[in-house]
Image (cartoon, helix red, strand yellow):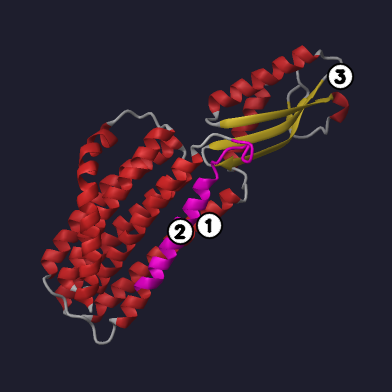
Amino acid sequence: MRHATAYTLLSGALWAATLSGALWAATLPGALWGRDEGNVDHAKQVALRSIGVGIIVLALKACAWWLTGSSALYSDALESVVNVASSVAASAALFYAARPADENHPYGHDKAEFFAAVLVGVLIIVAALSIFQHAWANWDPPTSLDAPLTGVAVNLAATAINAAWALLLGRTARQARSAVLRADARHLWSDVATSFAVVVGVGIVLWTGLGWMDGAIAVGVGVHVLWSGWGVVRENIAGLMDEAPGGEVMSRTRDLIHRHAEGAIEAHDLRMRHAGRTSYLEFHLVLPGEMRVADAHAICDRVEAALKAELEGIVVTIHVEPEGKAKHHGVLVL
């Protein structure tokens, strides 16, 4: 049964790797040492390459499991299946999120990244449950390990590829402010950590001869994967729910308004939210009642320019009010 399952998994993975490997190898140098532009196009290219990387890593890890029959290495290979699925979801989300605003979506499509990132988290959780099921099925009697040293060597090669790509993916996510790439990079680092734990665990099994520890290690990997998936889901549901940014961002925003709103009386009712790479800020700016419209507009332009210069991807909406509307709290300018 194991050999039939492994053959099916390997056949699909190796077939896809053959198609994608040449493209990935040709584009990898440019991706790793290209310019740090951090734009959407670069993020989409990296997301597409991630699919090829994931397929190659999956093929290697499936081969490691097939060689050894280890439940722990099976759990590692299964997590790589999720890597491929999440890379596909990330690519689709980035392409959709990059579409310009239209009549039905006047604020753009950036939130598609949060939906895709939640999907990635759910897939990670499903992988964890499958790991638990496989570990239980092979717990008693424990499966003996075949060709363990060769399997571990193949698994380490896959882990090295994953680590290099996780570095690139994390850097690109920061530059492009991409929620889905950040979730994908986080999952890759989780995969790297579990791969090292699996290799160490297989070494302990070989050293002690305790076959049941292979299943125990798989369960430990499953717990780690489950926790990682829940973290991705929780973080990106917050984005879907328009959660306010951290206190540091809000303090910086208030300071910018205070320093650049000279001529105003106060700013209150500040509200801010994130949608993918875009942040939306709105607030009320209280000005002297006798001030000319042109002068009030100049103050608003100055504040908006300062905010956009310091906070990347921000959209600012300012509601001007006369001094009688002052609430005497918020950002005092005078």
- Residue 186 visible to the viewer: no
What is the x, y in percent for residue 74? 26, 69
In which quarter of the view is residue 172 placed? top left
Q: CA distance from mark 3 to mark 2?
A: 52 Å
Tell me if label 1 and label 2 are in contact, CB under 8 Å.
Answer: yes
Q: Amino acid at mark 3?
A: Gly
For marks 1 and 3 on the same chain, the one whose residue lies earlier in the sequence? 1
Q: Which residues are magenta?
A: 102-131
Q: Nearer the viewer, mark 1 or mark 2?
A: 2
Q: Amino acid at mark 1?
A: Arg
Q: CA distance from mark 1 to mark 2?
A: 9 Å
Q: Residues within 10 Å of mark 1 (few under 14, many from 20)?
A: few
List the residue tagged with mark 1: 234
> Which residue is depicted at the point 42% across and 67% down?
126
List the residue tagged with mark 2: 121
Image-based side of 16 in relation to 183, left or right: left
Q: Amino acid at mark 2?
A: Gly
Q: Secondary structure at mark 1?
A: helix
List the residue tagged with mark 3: 289
